[in-house]
Amino acid sequence: MTRTRIKICGLRRKEDISYVNEVLPDFAGFIFDPSRRRYIDPETAAVLRPQLADSIRAVGVFVNAAPEEILRIAETVRLDLIQLHGSEDDTYIRNLRKQTSLPIIKAIRVRTEEDTAQAAASSADLILLDNGAGGTGTRFNWELAQKVSRDFLLAGGISAENAADAIRLCHPWGLDASSSLETEGMKDPEKIRSFMEAVRQADADL
């Protein structure tokens, strides 16, 4: 059975850690861009990180940050992966890779077929396809994702209600969810559990 990886992003509280530890997604995301609503400061993330279950890999999300800042936070928090969610290009990625052995995920805003071509050509270890709206929970045209031949994470409006359709139509390597797993701006354990169950059931059905 093909297994779709799962990333739950935007963790900020010890309660969030306990929620994901119950269901064991593959990845947990901490957002280090101060302009984002789900921002967490590195010091708080460093306290929460050791509380994650051993099987969950910690991802740090950055937006046009200086490489030195990324490296400092990665060491402080003990990140497993780095996710770039801004306008970072391949030159930036190559420079960052010279300074760290951590895998690099590059988020790419998908609006046209040209965007999918850019995604396919990225030198990042893994790409994430999103609508680029910064965590508003809005999906893009999934027909464009069908044109990407390499492994990718699918983000943007992914929820328990549409996870099966996303897997069936796009065959993503993984799904990334955040806002759909919240109630009044906070992670909701029931929504997280329902999302995990929907993904696993979809995998089983396929």
Image: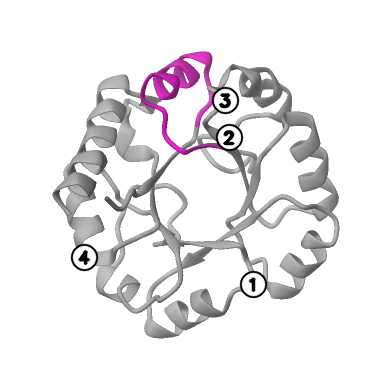
**Does the stretch in magenta take in 22?**
yes
Of marks 2 and 3, which one's residue comes earlier in the chain? 2
Alpha-carbon span between mark 3 and mark 1: 28 Å
Residue type at tag 1: Ser
Q: Magenta span covers which residues?
A: 11-29
Q: CA distance from mark 1 to mark 4?
A: 25 Å
Q: Residues within 10 Å of mark 2 (few under 14, many from 20)?
A: some
Which residue corresponds to the image point at 23% horizontal and 48% vertical from the top-left? Answer: 203
Q: Which residue in the protein does label 1 denote?
A: 123
Is residue 113 covered in magenta?
no
Q: Earlier in the sequence, mark 4 or mark 2?
A: 2
What residue sits right under mark 4 in the picture? 169
The C terminus sits in image quarter? bottom left
Label 3 or label 1, whichever lies nearer to me, is: 3
Which labelled disc corresponds to residue 185? Answer: none
Element at label 2? loop
